[in-house]
Image (tube, rainbow, N blue to C red):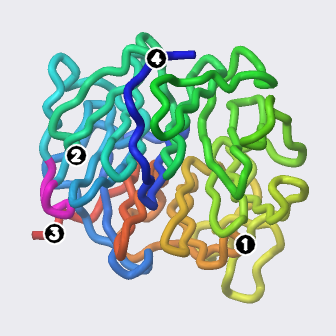
Amino acid sequence: MIARGNLPTMALLAATVLAPLTGATGTSALFQSTDRGRSWHRADAGLPPGARINALGSIQNVLLAGSDAGLYVSLNQATDWSPARIDSLAQERVLSLATTRTTVFAGTDGSGLLRSVDQGATWNRDAAFRGRTVRCLLALDDRTYAGTDTGEVFVAGHGEPEWTAWSEGLPVPAQVFALVRVCDRVCAALYARGLFIRHESAPGWNVATGVSPLALAGIEGVLVAGHNPGGLYWSEDLGGSWLKARESAPPSWLAGSLVSEGSGELQSSAPVWALAAGEDLVVAGVANGIYISYDQGRTWERARTGLPANSPGVAFLITEGRVFAAVAVTAGEAAPGVED
């Protein structure tokens, strides 16, 4: 077991996970939607344009962005951003964020886990994760989970002073790219190793067949999996069976598709970089854009208004009445300007 401090109690709606991005170069931009993903405007004043935003989080009235150039905070609903005050870690590469009602966790690339109990104003390093890369985080009302680049998953419950390793049944070495809990199951997406599922009250992980995702989301008992390449899948029986996602309109869509440029038709092999769920929405960052599902991941619509034409979403945050999307603006594409 790994020693740590007390864990607070309740997770917020958003979950953000870093997904790999290959072949996309250019700048990073942050967009905000107040109409459930139908239209978007820039919300990244103060964020470094050349540094990719890997994760987004929210605690009380504070927004957080983890980037390749460190952590940034906004106190005014993304009107502007400023660097977090982290001694000697101002330029630390932040890969993952997760928030409870009182605590923010930030996973870094090789420098372990950071923790803040004052809405991101000050940060402390968790000695338990010293030297580790914490690629993904999942914070819920009763437990917090951390996935590393060495095939380890750690868990700590509310009031427990230590992290416990949940690695039995996981292949080593492996990179844990995504964690999500659906009902009483914890699901882990491992790079090039597949999907592993564990019942919270039973020991050991079991590999799930039929999918090999890098991005995961859970909503109302439905597990959504994003492949790279390979598109989007959904399961309503905790990974026992899977169906490929479809385009919600027009009615002439082809079964098992993700949306191709100009037609809205989903391409079955399109890489999926990131997923997030909350507020009755699922949002997917796909190689050619951002897609929204209003029916728990079964069908999808492409988000277009206000977004750069063919740039993937790489991190999301869903809060009450707002959706934030970090976009990697590919070379040759122009991102719409920051609104005054």
> Which residue type does callout 4 highlight?
Ala
Mark 3 → mark 1, Cα distance in angstroms: 33 Å
Q: Is residue 88 left or right of residue 233?
A: left
Q: Secondary structure at mark 1?
A: loop
Residues marked 3 and 2 touching at CB (< 8 Å): no
Residues marked 2 and 1 touching at CB (< 8 Å): no
The residue that mark 3 highlights is 339
Categorize mark 2 by other alpha carbons within 10 Å: few (<14), some (14-19), many (20+).
many
Q: Secondary structure at mark 2?
A: loop
Residue 149 placement: quadrant: top right
First in residue order: circle 4 vs circle 2: 4
Closer to the camera, 90 or 118? 118
Mark 4 → mark 2, Cα distance in angstroms: 23 Å
Residue 98 placement: quadrant: top left
Closer to the camera, 65 or 260? 65
Q: Please, which residue is most extreme toward the front here?
A: 159
Q: Is residue 134 visible?
A: yes
Give, as a single range, the part of the protein colored magenta: 75-81
First in residue order: circle 3 vs circle 4: 4
Q: Is residue 37 left or right of residue 250?
A: left
Closer to the camera, 6 or 225? 6
Categorize mark 3 by other alpha carbons within 10 Å: few (<14), some (14-19), many (20+).
few
The residue that mark 4 highlights is 3
Give yes or no for residue 194 being in the magenta stretch: no
Kindly report which numbered mark, 3 or 1, lies closer to the viewer in this rendering: 1
The residue that mark 2 highlights is 119
Categorize mark 4 by other alpha carbons within 10 Å: few (<14), some (14-19), many (20+).
some
> Which residue type does callout 3 highlight?
Glu
Residues marked 3 and 1 touching at CB (< 8 Å): no
Q: Is residue 212 left or right of residue 4?
A: right
